[in-house]
Image (tube, grey):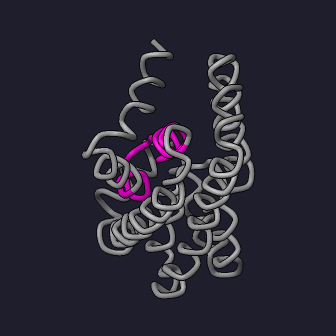
Amino acid sequence: MLRKIYDWCIDAAHKPYALWVMGMVSFAESSFFPVPPDVMLIPMSLARPERAWLYATLCTVTSVVGGAVGYAIGALLYDSVGHWVIQFYGYGDKVAAFRAGYAEWGAWIILLKGLTPIPYKLVTITAGFADFNFWQFIGLSVIARGGRFFVVAILLNRYGVWIREQIEKRLTLWVSLGAGVLVLGFIVAVRLV
């Protein structure tokens, strides 16, 4: 099963709809969807390392636009949609502390959490809820999300062939390690908030 998903993502890099799907996943992940765009960014960049820059740019732009939607959810719809999303991820009792943290450390929260494997939608919704400056939020999101996606692009563009060989030899190990990093990111995020 894991091999089939990996092979589908690798093959998707050569399909005309691949950029649309990646863009939609990146957009949705910043406002409501639980799956990060890395699940497509990494395999597609491995399949076509010369396009890693394009993929990183697409993920950055759509993630920031999706982040603006997440911000709007927090600012305008927190009592309904925003609250539901925050509750779904188990952070309902931490919103007040997160809001207070934005008053003092908002820029650092956006920069640091935008680079980590925690769900970015939590940052975007609470930034809107905390009434963080929208344009500053957009600028910091470009830096954080762009930094995250372009580091992946740099590594996969330069070492993509070698990385692909290593991943394909031990796919289960690498996917398990990736899942472990995501879980660790969630745990650290819960403890910091």
Placement of the C terminus among the 4 image quadrants: bottom right
Residue drawn at (34%, 72%) of the image:
72
Residue drawn at (39%, 40%) of the image:
13
Say if 18 sits above or below 67 in the image.
above
Say if 58 sits above or below 86 in the image.
below
Residue drawn at (37%, 64%) of the image:
66
The quadrant where residue 94 appears: bottom right
Along the horizontal axis of the image, is 80 left or right of 124?
A: left
What number of labels is visible?
0
User: Which span of residues is magenta-colored?
Assistant: 27-45
- Where is residue 121 shown, x and y percent of the image? 47, 57
Report if residue 152 lies within the magenta region: no
110 or 130, which lies in front?
Answer: 110
**Farthest residue toward the top?**
1
- Where is residue 107 shown, x and y percent of the image? 65, 79
- Where is residue 12 shown, x and y percent of the image? 36, 36
- Where is residue 54 shown, x and y percent of the image? 46, 61
Along the horizontal axis of the image, is 86 left or right of 107?
A: left
Report if residue 40 lies within the magenta region: yes
